[in-house]
Image (spheres, rainbow, N blue to C red):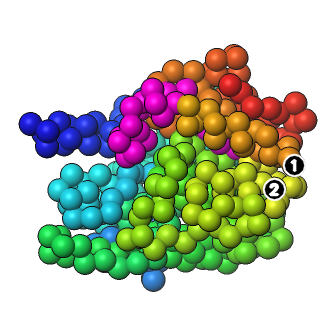
């Protein structure tokens, strides 16, 4: 009975985590300038099953701004989580053009605020280039390892970090005129955005690099408990070893001319399942983390906490904080360097 309950919960949070649920369509049916998405296979990339993957790209005429979006989709670290409970997306299937078109594009063009070009939605990144970085490695985009898990009967390639490096390097070559980059992602992709941020800086040395992480908070020691991934983590001066929650504030302190944001719901309904804690007991962890982000001495890091219980803020354009701030309005202040931009609680 316990295993049935676990399988049910796993299925539930994956359905929430993966952007396949129906939602109000915000994008108009007729094509917009720059609305076309294309898939590019990229040599050297590798999903958990060993197959090659790539990236999605939607360019905008003469754009000097680029959004790098890291997809979410759970995590796994042994035969049980990867192949029995299947707590990470696309570990057994890989991710190619067919999945990009059927799984990713519908959400990128209808639900996800930051990649909407619809003029009726006040997305400040509407005229930017968009890059979609898939997730098929089970390692929150942090891995640099190959594992033969006992009981799996197959090799597992945790190459999320390496994929991110190869894709962002390719994008830097394709979009050399980029002057400003937003590194962002949701859930596992929100972790990936934070972990990959220093390496994006290296690939765009003459651009301003901002960071927006959605629903990516850990309980103490979680990342450290996953040596299977051989996670590659930031090494900034203020970053605390392998404690994920120190990275965004540390990166903000090291990069005072950029802006950093963290998003979450007041009660997250998915992350606690990874940490074996209740939603209620995890809420203070979010509170503490957001306080640390807001108190960054360089005053360039803020948070938005949507009022309610869910997971991933970025697919809810008009979500409100308990003090009345609307997410898309907060996002516009983030983007425009509005001096009144502040944390929304």
Is residue 276 part of the magenta span, yes or no? yes
Residue 260 in sight here: yes
- Percent across and percent down for residue 119 are 67, 34
Is residue 280 part of the magenta span, yes or no? yes
Residue 61 in sight here: no
Question: Does 247 sit above or below residue 196?
Answer: above
Say which quadrant the N terminus sits in. top left
In the image: residue 241, left or right of residue 36: right
Q: How many marks?
A: 2
In the image: residue 253, left or right of residue 172: right
Of residues 7 and 122, the one nearer the viewer is 7
Disc 1 crowd, CA 10 A, few/some/many (<14, 14-19, 20+): some
Question: Does 167 sit above or below residue 276?
Answer: below
* Residue found at the far left of this picture: 1
Q: Which residue is mark 1?
A: 298
- Percent across and percent down for residue 263 are 61, 38
Give the residues in magenta.
261-283
Report the residue at 41% width, 64% height from top. 226
Question: Does 225 sit above or below residue 288?
Answer: below
In the image: residue 254, left or right of residue 231: right
Report the residue at 76% width, 38% height from top. 294
Q: Which residue is mark 2?
A: 253
Disc 2 crowd, CA 10 A, few/some/many (<14, 14-19, 20+): many
Of residues 262 and 29, the one nearer the viewer is 262
Report the residue at 26% width, 57% height from top. 81
- Percent across and percent down for residue 309 are 47, 24
């Amino acid at each position: 009975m316990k295993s049935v309950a676990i399988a049910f919960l796993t299925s539930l949070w994956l359905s929430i985590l993966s952007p396949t649920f129906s939602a109000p369509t915000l994008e108009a049916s007729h094509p917009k300038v720059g609305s076309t998405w294309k898939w590019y296979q990229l040599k050297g990339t590798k999903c958990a099953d060993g197959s090659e993957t790539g990236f999605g790209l939607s360019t905008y005429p003469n754009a000097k701004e680029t959004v790098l979006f890291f997809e979410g989709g759970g995590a796994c670290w042994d035969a049980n989580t990867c192949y029995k409970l299947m707590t990470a997306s696309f570990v057994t299937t890989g991710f190619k053009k067919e999945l990009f078109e059927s799984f990713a594009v519908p959400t990128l063009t209808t639900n996800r605020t930051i990649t909407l070009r619809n003029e009726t939605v006040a997305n400040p990144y509407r005229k930017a280039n968009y890059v979609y970085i898939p997730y098929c490695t089970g390692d929150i985009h942090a891995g640099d390892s190959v594992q033969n898990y006992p009981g799996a009967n197959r090799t597992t390639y945790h190459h999320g970090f390496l994929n991110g490096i190869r894709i962002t390097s390719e994008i830097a070559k394709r979009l050399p005129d980029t002057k400003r980059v937003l590194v962002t992602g949701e859930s596992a992709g929100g972790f990936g955005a934070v972990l990959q941020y220093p390496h994006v800086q290296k690939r765009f040395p003459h651009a301003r690099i901002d960071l927006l992480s959605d629903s990516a908070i850990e309980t103490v020691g979680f990342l450290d408990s996953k040596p299977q991934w051989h996670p590659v983590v930031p090494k900034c001066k203020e970053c605390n070893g392998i404690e994920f929650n120190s990275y965004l504030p540390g990166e903000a302190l090291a990069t005072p001319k950029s802006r950093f944001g963290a998003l979450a719901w007041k009660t997250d309904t998915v992350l606690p399942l990874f940490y074996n804690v209740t939603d209620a007991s995890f809420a203070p962890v979010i509170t503490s983390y957001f306080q640390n982000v807001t108190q960054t001495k360089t005053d360039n890091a803020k948070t938005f906490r949507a009022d309610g219980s869910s997971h991933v803020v970025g697919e809810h354009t008009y979500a409100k904080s308990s003090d009345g701030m609307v997410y898309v309005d907060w996002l516009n202040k983030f983007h425009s360097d509005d001096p009144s931009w502040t944390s929304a609680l």
